Image (cartoon, rainbow, N blue to C red):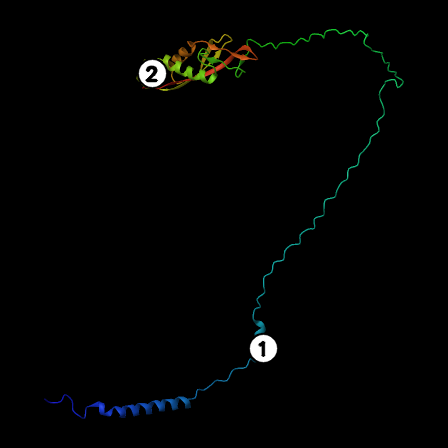
Amino acid sequence: MLPKKRENADLEKKKSLFFEIGLAIALLLVLIAFKWRVQIKDTELITNPQELNELEEIVPITRQEPERPKVKPPVKIRLQDVITIVENDSKEDPNLVIEEEDINQNTEIDISPPEEVSYDTEIVDETEIFVVVEDMPIFRPDICSSMAEGNIELNKHIQKSIKYPALAQENGITGRVFVRFIVGRDGKVKNAEILRGIDPSLDQEALRVIRNLPAFAPGKQRGVPVQVTYSASINFVLQ
């Protein structure tokens, strides 16, 4: 078998030589580094010192607070009693003598009954029409004890009594009719009128129902029956 390399090409034998050459080169570089010199330029002197004064000076910003005005303490005012002398304008006799009566157990004293004081009763005008009174009219007083309960029964009665006009049904007319009337001193309904209507046929039906309402409990002002204005609304809706 032939060897792979020639003996002259074997570098292992020359390893010590390469090491010495490398060491010599390193020493040479170190010596050159120590001997190397760099030219140093001389520093320039400032010939014009005024250039330093031309630099802008940074002035700190300060805020001067305004002086507060001195508040003087309030002056205490001392009130003194002022006595005003008024001349006596009384015409009474300064020499008036008060007589004292001797009263004992046997002295008779006349005790008369006090005079009767008559109080005039307030007369209420029967023709006057009130808007608000102490006791408002109540619908169906036989089953209602207050105006609120009466209004609920009034709406139920109106809904049962309404007959929708055929002409209005054919034309599809709906809406709310507002009626105003007067509850008289006897509780009966009178002077019904339309406040706001929507159709003549519906308005007439609303008046018919209101005029045929049963009697209310009349409104009272200081216990006296009076005439009171009342209002109701009837809503016409097609089922």
The tag on residue 176 is none
Say which residue label 2 marks.
168
In depth, the one of 227 and 208 nearer the eye is: 227
Say which residue label 1 marks.
49
Query: Which residue is found at the position 32% from the left and 90% from the top?
Result: 23
Residue 99 appears left or right of 230: right
Query: Which residue is found at the position 59% from the left and 75% from the top?
Result: 50
Q: Residue furthest left?
A: 1
Which x, y percent locates residue 90?
Answer: 84, 20
Which tag, 1 or 2, sits closer to the chain's start?
1
In depth, the one of 54 and 118 nearer the eye is: 118
Which x, y percent locates residue 31?
Answer: 39, 91
Kind of residue indicated by mark 1: Pro
Residue 128 appears left or right of 92: left
Q: Are marks 1 and 2 in contact (CB under 8 Å)?
A: no
Asked where in the image residue 222 lies, by quadrant, the reply is top right
Which x, y percent locates residue 22?
Answer: 31, 90
Q: Can I make out residue 147 in this image?
A: yes
Query: Which residue is found at the position 39% from the left and 15% from the top?
Result: 156
Quadrant of the snapshot with the C terminus: top left
Q: Residues within 10 Å of mark 1 (few under 14, many from 20)?
A: few
Q: Can I make out residue 195 in this image?
A: no
In depth, the one of 194 and 214 nearer the eye is: 214
Kind of residue indicated by mark 2: Ala
Task: Judge whether 11 appears above or below 239 on screen.
Answer: below
Helix or strand or loop: what does disc 2 sit on?
helix
Residue 208 appears left or right of 82: left
Residue 188 appears left or right of 174: right
Task: Judge whether 30 appears above or below 122 on screen.
Answer: below
Which x, y percent locates residue 204?
Answer: 39, 12
